[in-house]
Image (cartoon, rainbow, N blue to C red):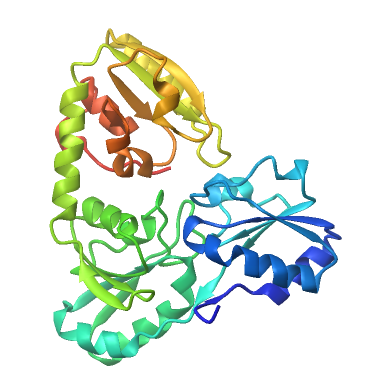
Amino acid sequence: MDLYDFKLDFVAKWINEKNGKSVAIQMPEGLKIYSQFIADELEKRTNATMFIIADACYGACDIAKDFSEFADVLVHFGHTEIPIMANNDRIFFVEISADVKYQSHLVELLPKLGNRIGLITTIPFLEELEKIKKWLEENGKQVFIGRRKGRAKYDGQVLGCDISAAKDISELVDEFLFIGNGDFHPLAVSIETKKKVIIFDPITQQIRDLADLPERVLRQRHAAISKASTAKKFLILVSTKVGQNRLHLATHLRKEAIDHNRKADLVVMNEFNPDLLIPFEADAYVSTACPRLAIDDFLRYPKPILTPVEFEIAIGIKRWRDYHLDFL
């Protein structure tokens, strides 16, 4: 537990203030290994019974909306609330922080960095961002942190569905330094800004870049669009997850398909699973849910799965030069 601060005293105080007798605990996949420890600690500090939610959780957009069937309150670890969830006083978003050992790695990284650097991160490492900025500036670098917009809560914070903090400063920087783990966030920044992104992963203590990954992903996306351009039947997939539901967009895309002499059916799902689509006839799918689904999970689907922008390119509404990633 030394790596992360789960702010359990603060969480227990909130549970007691809400008079919660039963508590749902929701965590993203990378943190689930700590859930039993957290449940034990919170039961010691409250009079509540803890229920650990085992279902997959992909972000603050993926709140367990049926938690009230078995719990008074829900504690969601690892993400900041998004606007659509901000007013629910029975849900507590715990902004965990991680203990980052960074200085020796930045010394190693310093000669590899350009002069103008954009700093971006995710919530566990946000508290270190200003310290890293100060250190880099003291060592001769110009450092920029983008302003928060959209679904992000803090300056410099990027989400899988919102990289506006990076786009805010893309014209001012030579490259980005991403403090965090995983490839999706820095990949989205690299593709959208066309700037190099260097990754410092505080968990593995590794420094790396994306190499040719952005180019490989774009080639795969272009192949999916090309294959779907001859499709006659589309399934437009709609998520029932609170923060991923874009029903209005889905119905708009269906109208566009019909206007361009294609057939399109609206299919509603909670957890996107290609096995659930087996009964339906289709030449291609369109995901209006989390932007990561079409990028990360495309190999799971027997037919091309597109984002809304990619769909519009495939049927001729937009051109290849209009390509960009999907953001909520």
In the depicted view, which residue is nearer to us: 133 or 207? 207
In the depicted view, which residue is nearer to us: 178 or 171? 178
Q: In which quarter of the image is the C terminus?
A: top left
Going 26% across and 55% down the picture, which residue do you hit? 187
Q: In which quarter of the image is the N terminus?
A: bottom right
Going 36% across and 87% down the picture, which residue do you hit? 134
Going 83% across and 58% down the picture, which residue do you hit? 20
Q: Where is residue 64 in the image (x, y as percent from the top left)?
A: 63, 45
Q: Residue furthest top?
A: 261
Using the rendered image of the protein, determine whether residue 173 is visible from the camera's viewpoint: no
Q: Where is residue 125 in the image (x, y as percent from the top left)?
A: 45, 73
Looking at the image, residue 147 sits to the left or right of residue 42; the answer is left
Using the rendered image of the protein, determine whether residue 98 is visible from the camera's viewpoint: yes
Q: Position of residue 219 (x, y in %)?
A: 14, 41
Q: Is 320 rendered above or below residue 292?
A: above
Looking at the image, residue 139 sits to the left or right of residue 158; the answer is left
Q: Position of residue 149 (x, y in %)?
A: 45, 56
Going 30% across and 58% down the picture, which residue do you hit? 183
Number of callouts in the render?
0
In the depicted view, which residue is nearer to us: 140 or 67? 67
Looking at the image, residue 52 sits to the left or right of residue 219; the answer is right
* Quarter where residue 221 is shown: top left
